[in-house]
Image (cartoon, rainbow, N blue to C red):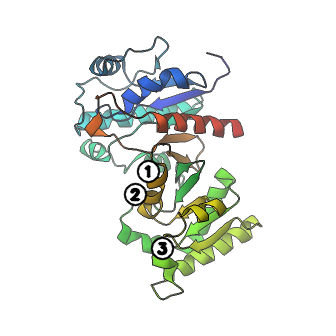
Amino acid sequence: MSANLPKIAVSVGDINGVGIEIALKSHEEISKICKPVYFINQDLLKEASKLLNLPIPSDFEIAQCGESFSIKPGIVSKKSGKFSFLSFENAILSTQNGSTDAVVTLPINKEAWKKAGLPYVGHTDVLSKHFKKDAIMMLGCDELFVALFSDHVPLKKVSKMIKANELAMFLINLYNSTKFENVGVLGFNPHAGDNGAIGGKEEKQISKAINLANKILKKEIFKGPLVPDAAFNPLSLKSCNRLVAMYHDSGLAPLKALYFDKSINVSLNLPIIRTSVDHGTAYDIAYKGVADTRSFKEAVKFAIKLLNRG
């Protein structure tokens, strides 16, 4: 491998899920474009290799972390939850101190984190608290990216979060992180409020936020509020395929219906680059040798693209 290739810290995720299978199966291909460093310990790696009947590549570089325990494929476990957090935490610190250039994460299980007593909802929550910044969660692929104003928040709380100044700052941070030029902002209510016929107070705040963000940026970057159920049809996506959703499922349900296999997760507005697969631990197929590697490979490629953008 060339000495000039970027060094990518790979957080291996929940060891009882599909993450380590994906890492082993993808290694040869991604090693052509980067130097991956896998945050796992030797004992767990050997056990996973044996269970999967997959050889450990000779150039599979690991950063030893966490204590060993027995892998239990497909089981929600306190030990696997704690280990997946330690893998992620060490990958963050490695990138923060310059030992690696970016972080790419394989999936964790939120229930396992809860069992382990971890005070975080997921990866993005860890990043926000670690760096004391409002991390932005964006998911998708070249054909469609969706940024989430609220992510893992109960729907009943989202309405109160939609305030013009806070949303405007989110939009500005999104632009500064991506330089996307044509971004549609989805409404909150059905038909984007239908001019007040179906609620609409949230859409008033969204409109104010769009105007404020465009005024501060001195260019017309954002438009909307768009009708959410129409924004994802093929004709609409031809004219605008960079979107902001007010809440998790309004943006991600259509994205995953269209581009589940190749979509990735990107954390923006942070001092480090972090990308991730856009799927879960897939316990039902863990250690069966059938896990799809496409999302992981796309996440690695996008991390490298962000690094090259500088």
Residue appearing at x 45%, y 14% in the figure: 57
Q: Position of residue 218 (x, y in %)?
A: 77, 67
Q: Farthest residue to the top: give it.
A: 58
Circle 2/circle 1 CB separation < 8 Å: yes
Residue 75 seen from this side: yes
The numbered dot on residue 221 is none
* Helix, strand or loop status at disc 3: loop
Residue appearing at x 48%, y 41% in the figure: 276
Sequence-earlier tag: 3 or 1: 1
Q: Position of residue 232 (x, y in %)?
A: 53, 63
Viewer-proximal residue, 71 or 160? 71
| Left-right relation of 41 to 176 | left
* Helix, strand or loop status at disc 2: loop
Q: Please identify the quarter of the rendering in which residue 241 is found.
A: bottom right
Residue appearing at x 54%, y 57% in the figure: 147
| Residue type for callout 2 | His
* Residue highlighted by disc 2: 152
* Residue highlighted by disc 3: 188
Viewer-proximal residue, 39 or 248? 248
Q: Residues within 10 Å of mark 2 (few under 14, many from 20)?
A: few
| Residue type for callout 3 | Phe
Residue 103, above or below 217? above
* Residue highlighted by disc 1: 125
